[in-house]
Image: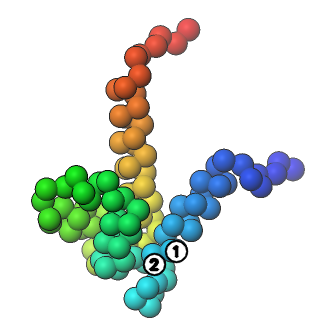
Amino acid sequence: EAKVSGSPERLSIESLTSLFQKYAGKGGYNCTLSKTEFLSFVNAELAAFTKSQKDPGVLDCVMKKLDTNNDGQLDFSEFLNLMGGLAMACHDSFLKAVPSQKRT
C-alpha cells in the first residue's frame, strides 16, 4: 500500500484546502467564500496582483467569472478554478523565461 503522508502532492492539496477554509465562513457559512471573504483572501494572499490592478472593478469581475453557478458565493470547486488559473499563468510565465529545449 502506497503511503502519501508528507508527499508534495498531499501537502499542496492540504495547503489549498487550509487556505480556502482560512477565509471561508467568516460570515457564517463555511463551505463558500462570500464576496467580502473573497476580497479579504485576494487582498491578503494575492496582494501583488491587487496592487498591480488599475481598475478598481477588476476583483468584482474576477468574482463574477469564477462564480459559475451565479449564487454570489465561491464554493471550493470555483476557488480551485482561480488557483488553477494562477498556476497556469505562473507556468506560462516560467516557460517564457526559460529558453526552449528540444526533447530527445
Q: Nearer the viewer, residue 69 or 15?
A: 15
**Residue flagged by tag 2: what amino acid is it?**
Ala
**Residue bearing mark 2:** 24
Q: Is residue 93 found left or right of 5 in the rendered image?
A: left
Q: How many marks?
A: 2
**Residue at figure coordinates x 42%, y 72% from the top left:** 75
State how the image is colored: rainbow
Residue most extreme to the right? 1
Q: Is residue 96 visible from the viewing direction of this image?
A: yes
On the image, which quarter does residue 72 sit in?
bottom left
Q: Nearer the viewer, residue 91 or 31?
A: 91
- Secondary structure beneath label 1: helix
State whether residue 65 is above or below residue 6: below
**Residue flagged by tag 1: what amino acid is it?**
Gln
Residue 99: horizontal and vertical position, in percent? 40, 17
- Tell me if mark 2 has few (under 14), some (14-19) or many (20+) residues whose alpha carbon lies within 10 angstroms of its own: many
**Decide: marks 2, 1 in contact (CB < 8 A)?**
yes
**Residue at figure coordinates x 58%, y 60% from the top left:** 15
Q: Is residue 67 visible from the viewing direction of this image?
A: no
- Secondary structure beneath label 2: loop
**Residue bearing mark 1:** 21
Q: Is residue 35 found left or right of 90 in the rendered image?
A: left
**Marks 2/1: CA–CA distance:** 5 Å
Q: Nearer the viewer, residue 32 or 40?
A: 40
Q: Quadrant of the C terminus?
A: top right
**Residue at figure coordinates x 29%, y 54% from the top left:** 49
Residue 94: horizontal and vertical position, in percent? 41, 32
**Residue at figure coordinates x 51%, y 67% from the top left:** 19
Q: Is residue 58 found left or right of 36 in the rendered image?
A: left
- Tell me if mark 1 has few (under 14), some (14-19) or many (20+) residues whose alpha carbon lies within 10 angstroms of its own: some
**Residue 90 badge:** none
